[in-house]
Amino acid sequence: FFIPVMATQPLLLQSLTTRLHYHLYNLISVCCAAFRLLEADSKSMRSMSGSRRNSGSSLVSSSSASSNLSHLEEDTWILWGRIVNEWDEWRRKKDKLLKELIRKGIPHHFRAIVWQLLCNATDMPVKNQYSELLKMSSPCEKLIRRDIARTYPEHDFFKGQDSLGQEVLFNVMKAYSLVDREVGYCQGSAFIVGLLLMQMPEEEAFCVFVRLMQEYRLRELFKPSMAELGLCIYQFEHLLQEHLPELNVHFRSQSFHTSMYASSWFLTLFLTFLPLPIATRIFDIFMYEGLEIIFRVGIAILQYNQTDLIQLDMEGMSQHFQKVIPHQFDSCPDKMILRAYQVKYNPKRMKKLEKEYTTIKNKEMEEQIEIKRLRTENRLLKQRIETLEKGQVTRAQEAEENYVIKRELAVVRQQCYTASESLEKAQDTIRELQQHKVTYTEEFVSGLQTQLEQSRLQETELLGALKEMQDKVLDLEKRSSSLPDEINVAQLQDELKLVKLREQETLRSFREMQEAHHTSRGGGGHWKESPKKNAMNELQDKLMSLRLREAQGQAELKEVKLKNLQLESQNQINCKLVVRHEQESASLQERLQNALSHNKTLQSQLNEMKRKMAESDCKSKEEVMAVRLREADSMAAMAELRQKIAELEIQKEEGLIQGQLNHSDSRQYITQLREQIAELKNEVRLSHRNTHTYIDCAPDRFYISILGAHIHPRNQVAICSVVPKTLQNF
């Protein structure tokens, strides 16, 4: 292929030196110098021919015209070479013309340098970090390896598991995942990087991709939230509703959502939807105009297929988008571009839609935050209700247990009361016996002693039952803090029933003893003096012991009441602690919200500072380029002045020669001059025929073609180098 190089284009020659071998660049420089000498010699010979040899000049002009017609494509390359060399001037003064040329298509071999200039990626600091980034490890390496085989699987550059294309694609994606860890890796970005690698080396492709992500809204598209993709879908839906309302109604009736077919358009810029030549044309315009061309092309495609899509159902439309639409413009890509620019696109309307979408999303975010807050509050309230219910159940069980204990204490008190009454009756009987001095037989006394022993045994059993009841009361107090099981409650109830039965048996035995005592009052006999006194003493001891037991029972009852009050106070303290913890959690949530808002403000300030630094860097670069342009203008002015001086000297020599011809009478001298002029004409013709010179640089087989079929006053020279097909992707 040919790489056109203007003789006065140092920027393009500099870009070639980064790609071609150092010796090839030296060879091109030598050829340029030789061709400048050839041009100067031919110009001097043409000037010396004078006005009398107009036929020779007309012959040269006719040959240059035919050369221009035969090399129209090379003229386009020359134009783009001039654009690249004078890039800042074209962007500043000829922006509309540059836009039209980009819409017509950038020549294949100029895409690499033009794309870098369009996105201002020619000199980026991140390029120096690229080699260091490749040495680091990325958490996205497995995902990148998995998706590499799916990126342009039919393209020769990316075929094969260990191909060069897959390796450099992996390097660029890995390096970017380390530079921008928030975005990391997204599958659609691999297609954009693959297209860049088809046009330029991996370092330059990495710089261009970083600039695209930062300046062309692609970073927001590839974030995990994909907020920018939602905005693009929202704007595209409104454009579809404005331009194609019938098709929009049909899509909604078939539940054929916009995201089903348009998401890949925005994520891959049509690189996975359309053939590569057409998608590359769209990418040319995208580099200059941004996402506007994606909206235009999308609406143009739907307009072109509206009649067919309205007649299809959801499955048919999916098949139509996959198989029919991508190949409709293979033969004429310009037709698609023309249709795209016939679509009405209002940037103000798009800004308004962006504000509407932002407002809707902010409301949704507020609603989601409110829903989350309500859910957390609901969850906390449920937990509190469950805690209160558990506490209420516990208090109810404690109240029931306290009620049971009170009933048991009342029963015990009643038993004590009956026992005290029985003791009083016994004392009364003793007094009566003392007054009447009744004598009893020894057999009756022995019977009373046996009954007394039985009553003592029953008394010990009663005391054991009372101790068991006290132990059970202590166990119930310990269990009041936790929820008792139903099985334990049933066991306690059974034990209470057994205790009641024992008490009834003791009462029954006591009554039997009283009845026996009353029956013994009617019997005769004589007591001896010593057994009578012993019986009285024993009865008094029993009376005192029963009174002591009654006092102990009352003290135990008071202790039970005191413990009940302590449990109630502990319950109130626990409720207050729960309320205090809830208040502390609410205050902590408020502090967390304040910290988050402060973090957001700091983040916005940081972004603003970064933007200002970027603006200052751009201004400094513009100033440097302006200085370079002024230097180039001054050098061009110097060259023009030198050319004018040379023309004046040539005119002076022509005048001298004309004067010699006018004053000479020698016919031989005139014939000699004519022969010299004829020789000069022949040399001029030979110089124009030999404008294409080929130099073989074996063994590398680089061919240099110096194109310059005609010499014109501005001294424009085109140098085209023919290199093997192996350098086409270079």
Image: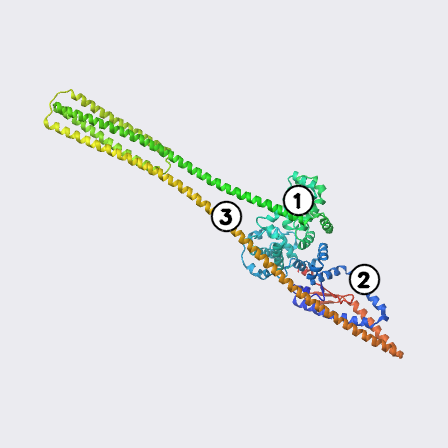
Q: CA distance from mark 2 to mark 3?
A: 77 Å
- N-term-proximal mark, 2 vs 3: 2
Quadrant where the N terminus sits is bottom right
The residue tagged 1 is: 238
Indicate the amino acid at tag 1. Answer: His
Indicate the amino acid at tag 2. Answer: Ser
At mark 3, the secondary structure is helix
Provide residue 679's location: percent of width, then percent of height: 83, 73
Instruction: Decide which of 406, 62 is in the foreground and name it.
Output: 406
Q: CA distance from mark 2 to mark 1?
A: 53 Å
Indicate the amino acid at tag 3. Answer: Gln
Instruction: Check disc 1: other Cα within 10 Å, few if <14, some if 14-19, many if 20+.
Output: some
Q: Quick check: can you spot residue 551?
A: yes
- N-term-proximal mark, 2 vs 1: 2
Image side of residue 709 versus residue 225, left or right? right
Q: Are marks 2 and 3 in contact (CB under 8 Å)?
A: no
The residue tagged 2 is: 66
Label disc, if present, on residue 593 of the rendered structure: 3
The answer to which image quadrant residue 627 occupies is bottom right
Instruction: Check disc 2: other Cα within 10 Å, few if <14, some if 14-19, many if 20+.
Output: few
Q: Is residue 634 above or below residue 478?
A: below
Instruction: Check disc 3: other Cα within 10 Å, few if <14, some if 14-19, many if 20+.
Output: few
Front of the two marks 2 and 3: 3
Instruction: Decide which of 480, 93 is in the foreground and name it.
Output: 93
Front of the two marks 3 and 1: 3
Q: Quick check: can you spot residue 697?
A: no
Provide residue 149's location: percent of width, then percent of height: 61, 52
Q: CA distance from mark 3 to mark 1?
A: 36 Å
Provide residue 222's location: percent of width, then percent of height: 59, 51
At mark 2, the secondary structure is helix
Q: Are marks 2 and 1 in contact (CB under 8 Å)?
A: no
- N-term-proximal mark, 3 vs 1: 1
